[in-house]
Image (tube, rainbow, N blue to C red):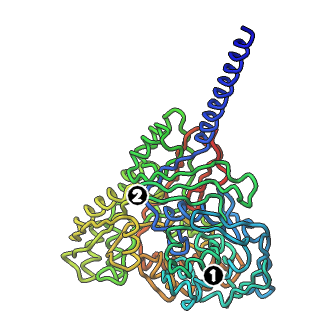
């Protein structure tokens, strides 16, 4: 009897241990699940090589997950802070920038790459030489465009990028460039691994850099199923202590805004992108959902392809602009979440010219202008509508239909055209459109980022969707770059805005309010004024 009792105790003890082990396993699985954040995004990225893309959809999926830059914008702001460079100096003539790199930074280990060394100057030189030198071996193996880099004229500005020692890099510029440091915080300047690039080059797989990314950033790329999911793991070796607070980050690609709302309500995702104005009220009233908002650092507009007739004529562009009932668009499309725009930059940008006003809605005068330009009976035109919601345009389809109706009243027959988002941007860069709905969210807080990036001659094959190159305007933008004096720069930029208003390469429509719906369990998710979402520093209750 004594031995039987002892055996029973042993069995009960073993059972208790097994039960405890099971409970601990379940608790661990629950804890792991609680540290998984799902983001309902609006579209598929074009890829994961930041230098060749221009949209917030791409940058959220690649730049602020996988990569870092020499200098970076603070979370939720536009202030530049040290990144992979701990500090930097500028020469007295303003043409040489010396960056001192951070020690001990590791590139990510993935199923397709295991680094044998830490980040150093070779990676910085490789990253920029690839964009600067058409004959650089990796670029020749994988020839792509670098629209932001060329839009801002950096290919002509940077004369050399030199490795001074393993942790020091020197940039030499042709001219003084006031926004240079801010520009290096932008997405295109994300630092790649030279070692990984060499591995791809040797294997004949250079294009994989756009599908299998490796960086030093807070999240490690695991997999991508187009139009479905992107999976990342938190980077346990990230160089910023305590910045990675979620173990798994999943992008659930959900183009339909109403479906994103339902997924958020059901806790199938904890953060969603770009709610429609029509959904704002129900999201605000929903339990366990937070709806922070702020004035958007953006402008939504209608770009005229100035290389196509008849919109190569400024009178025609002004007529089309005057025929659009923008007040009706603000009411129906933005539904209280936007205000009418009159400038190529938002009112919160320094150097904004408050004196500029949009032409009044006047179909009669618009028709007279068309007659003066030689089109008394109007003409046919293609009008492109974005397939996705963006902060600057929550419903491009509805907006295009309203513009189509307005233009019909002055004899202009618009055919509405759309494509999948990546294809839309690609074809627009190629200049296939007559007129297109698009917009821009500031990248770095500098006026050059607006006037230079979306309107200069350098940006004609990039973000300048008007394909507009106008000498007097371009000269003012260039002068603005070549001095650090804010008052002088402001003078040049205000003159440039006056020329813009006279020539009207695009019709400003609206500056919108930005909302960031999240589950109440999400902690410290910030609205990024520069138009992307980032998840470093974010955690879950």
Nearer-N-terminus badge (2/1): 1
- Residue at 49%, 78% in the rendered image: 455
- Residue at 44%, 55% in the rendered image: 42
Residue 362 visible in the displayed image: no
Name which quarter of the figure residue 351 lies in.
bottom right
Q: CA distance from mark 2 to mark 1?
A: 31 Å
Q: Which mark is residue 227?
A: 2
Compared with 100, 219 (above or below) is above
- Residue at 70%, 63% in the rendered image: 79
Residue 263 visible in the displayed image: yes
| Dot 1 crowding, Cα within 10 Å, few <14, some 14–19, many 20+ | many
Measuring from the top left, give residue 119's x and y in whole percent: 72, 72
- Residue at 42%, 75% in the rendered image: 465
Measuring from the top left, give residue 507's x and y in whole percent: 41, 69
Q: Which mark is residue 128?
A: 1
| Dot 2 crowding, Cα within 10 Å, few <14, some 14–19, many 20+ | some
């Amino acid at each position: 009897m004594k031995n039987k009792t002892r055996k029973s105790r042993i069995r009960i003890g073993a059972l208790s241990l097994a039960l405890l082990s099971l409970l601990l396993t379940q608790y661990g699985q629950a804890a792991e699940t609680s540290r998984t954040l799902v983001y309902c995004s609006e579209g598929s990225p074009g890829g994961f090589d930041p230098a060749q893309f221009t949209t917030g959809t791409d940058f959220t999926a690649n730049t602020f997950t996988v990569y870092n830059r020499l200098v970076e914008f603070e979370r939720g702001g536009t202030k530049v802070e040290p990144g992979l460079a701990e500090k930097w100096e500028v020469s007295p003539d303003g043409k040489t920038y010396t960056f001192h790199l951070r020690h001990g930074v590791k590139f990510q280990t993935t199923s397709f790459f295991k680094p044998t060394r830490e980040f150093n100057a070779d990676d910085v030189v490789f990253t920029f030489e690839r964009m600067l030198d058409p004959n650089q071996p990796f670029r020749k193996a994988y020839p792509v465009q670098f629209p932001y880099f060329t839009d801002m004229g950096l290919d002509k500005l940077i004369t050399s990028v030199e490795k001074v020692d393993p942790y020091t890099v020197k940039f030499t510029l042709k001219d003084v460039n006031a926004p240079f440091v801010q520009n290096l915080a932008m997405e295109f300047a994300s630092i790649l691994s030279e070692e990984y690039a060499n591995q791809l080059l040797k294997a004949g797989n250079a294009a994989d850099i756009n599908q299998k990314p490796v960086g030093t950033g807070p999240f490690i790329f695991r997999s991508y199923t187009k139009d479905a999911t992107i999976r990342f793991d938190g980077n346990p070796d990230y160089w910023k202590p305590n910045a990675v607070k979620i173990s798994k980050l999943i992008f659930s690609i959900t183009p339909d805004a109403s479906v994103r709302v339902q997924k958020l309500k059901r806790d199938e995702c904890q953060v969603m992108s770009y709610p429609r104005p029509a959904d704002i009220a129900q999201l605000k009233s929903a339990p366990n959902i937070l709806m922070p908002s702020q004035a958007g650092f953006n402008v939504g507009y209608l770009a005229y392809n100035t290389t196509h007739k008849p919109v190569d004529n400024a009178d025609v562009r002004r007529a089309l602009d005057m025929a659009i009932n923008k007040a009706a668009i603000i009411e129906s499309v933005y539904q209280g979440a936007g205000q009418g725009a009159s400038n190529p930059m938002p009112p919160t940008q320094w150097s904004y010219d408050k004196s500029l006003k949009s032409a009044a809605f006047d179909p009669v005068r618009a028709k007279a202008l068309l007659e003066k330009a030689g089109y008394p009976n109007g003409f046919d035109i293609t009008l492109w509508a974005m397939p996705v919601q963006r902060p600057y345009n929550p419903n491009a389809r509805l907006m295009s239909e309203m513009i189509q109706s307005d233009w019909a009243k002055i004899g202009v027959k618009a055919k509405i055209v759309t494509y999948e988002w990546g294809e839309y941007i690609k074809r627009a860069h190629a200049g296939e459109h007559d007129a297109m709905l698009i917009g821009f969210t500031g990248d770095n807080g500098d006026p050059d980022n607006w006037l230079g990036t979306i309107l200069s001659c350098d940006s004609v094959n990039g973000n300048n969707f008007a394909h507009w190159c106008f000498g007097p305007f371009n000269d003012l933008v260039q002068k603005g770059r070549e001095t650090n004096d804010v008052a002088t720069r402001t003078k040049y930029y205000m003159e440039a805005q006056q020329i813009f208003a006279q020539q009207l390469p695009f019709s400003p429509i609206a500056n919108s309010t930005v909302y960031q719906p999240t589950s109440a369990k999400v902690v410290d998710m910030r609205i990024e004024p520069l138009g992307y979402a980032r998840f470093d520093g974010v955690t879950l209750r």
